[in-house]
Amino acid sequence: MKKRIFIVDDEPKIGELFVTVLRRDGFDARAFVNPLAVLEKIDEGVVPDVMLADLMMPNLNGIELLEALKKRKLMLPVIIMTAHSSVQTAVEAMRLGAFHYLQKPVNLEEMRALIEKALDLYDAKKELHEIKTSQAASHPIEGILGDNDSIEQVRETIRTLRNVPNTIVLITGETGTGKNLVAKTIHYNSTYNAGRFMEINCAALPDNLLEAELFGYEKGAFTDARDAKPGLLEVADGGTVFLDEIDSMSASLQAKLLSFLESRTFRRLGGVDDIRVTTRILCASNANLEEKVAEKSFRKDLYFRINVVNIYMPPLRQMGRDVIEIADAVIYDFNQELRRDIQGFTSRAEDKLLGHNWPGNVRELRNVLERAMIFSQGNRIDAEDLILSSSLGLDEISSVNGRFQFPTGRSLEELERAYILHILESRKDSYAEIADVLGISKKTLWEKRKRYNLDEEATRP
Ligand SMILES: Nc1ncnc2c1ncn2[C@@H]1O[C@H](COP(=O)(O)OP(=O)(O)OP(=O)(O)O)[C@@H](O)[C@H]1O
Ligand SMILES: [Mg+2]
């Protein structure tokens, strides 16, 4: 598409000349002698990409024209053309939002260069604006689902944080409860989000790389530092750095982070200048930080510093019937994405959803539903469509140095069920002997086989 340029000058010859030149350059150029006619055109929806406007015109002068455009909230670069004697007014026009000015008689090369610059800059700005609005739109506070008091409290906290610059927030909760979602929602709904949202997982990088990523480095700071590189704290100035799994941070980095949070300044690795930024720091952890503090693997002072505002995401299994509501919302989303028209669940499917304990929380729920929707035939999801990992395999329990490592988020009953199933499947012995191995009576074993539906599942040798 050709870029559209409007030229407004009460002297028709000027407009004619510019139109000829700019059309030759490949623009869709149009001239107007009356600024009111330009506004009419714009109000019809024909908006130029750049406008050149004379400063002194009857009806409406250049400044008034700028004001009229501003009222229409148009992000449109205007280049003001002016005689030498009124350069001062042109500078005034720039304060009002004009992109730049050209002195008459206009030098054509200078005009071309300014137009190109204006187009580049406004393209970039428009893109940024679009990204920002679309990302805010794709992270509405209501997108954090859950109709219970704890989640309502979370949404309320995020609403309150909208107008608070530089807050530190600690987001806690089990895996899949929406910690990343909350971090993004805080950023994109804040009025202080001119800068970028950058996230980094503290568990994913070795210590020295994490430090270099966060604080940046100067050329020659270490062997591989061939060029200087700004850290995330600088890259996200005016925005947010989200430190995921903050509990994995080493002691020395914890100290460095604390010092940054206290002074709001830092130095790049190998650098000597103190750099000051207004970057919001959000932290997340699914470990119990208080325990980590007690066992001295997490600094107490840092814990107090980041625990100013704590957002706790409750596990899905504590949300009762909310599971169904969240599931309905997820289905609504996937219907659009997968072009399906699933209407909800059969009552057996609902029971199955309500009976599961969701160790992977909303992430697990989304995965289960996506799979169910891809494979379901009818317009309601039935119990058979829901493939739940309710039977915990014993391979999830690993043994390290003779000490068992159990998966987190599993109930005692699940572990018991998995263990009995494992023994049933791995031994040829009679039920009496298996009861002995487990240290329970034959009757208790029989009750547990019924209760956990083990006879159906166990493949006995
Ligand atoms: N309350 C919620 N409402 C809507 N979607 C949610 C909610 N909680 C989680 N989700 C969705 O579940 C998925 C996992 O969420 P997210 O990555 O934010 O979890 P997390 O707590 O950061 O997990 P982890 O500890 O494993 O990093 C995402 O698709 C997210 O959008
Ligand atoms: Mg996460």
Image: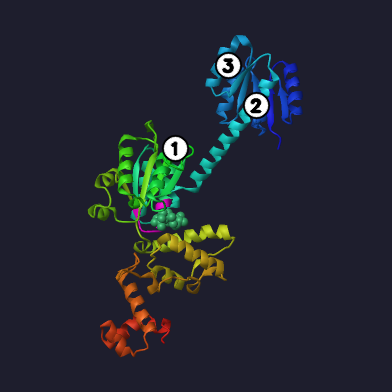
- Quarter of the picture containing the N terminus is top right
Of labels 3 and 2, earlier in sequence is 3
Q: Magenta stretch?
A: 172-180
* Mark 3 Cβ and ligand 1 under 8 Å apart: no
Compared across the picture, whether 13 is left or right of 325 comes to: right
Q: Is residue 176 magenta?
A: yes
Please give the residue where the numbered disc 2 appears in the rendered image: 115
Can you tell which of label 3 and label 2 is closer to the viewer?
Answer: 2
- Residue at the spot x=65%, y=32% of the render? 47
- Sort mark 3 into few (<14), some (14-19) or many (20+) by Cα contacts within 10 Å: many
SS of the residue at dot 3? helix
- Residue 422, visible in the rendered structure: yes
Whole-percent x, y for residue 38 in the image? 67, 25
Query: If the picture is divided into quarters, which one holds ligand 1?
Result: bottom left
Whole-percent x, y for residue 65 in the image? 60, 22
* Mark 1 Cβ and ligand 2 under 8 Å apart: no
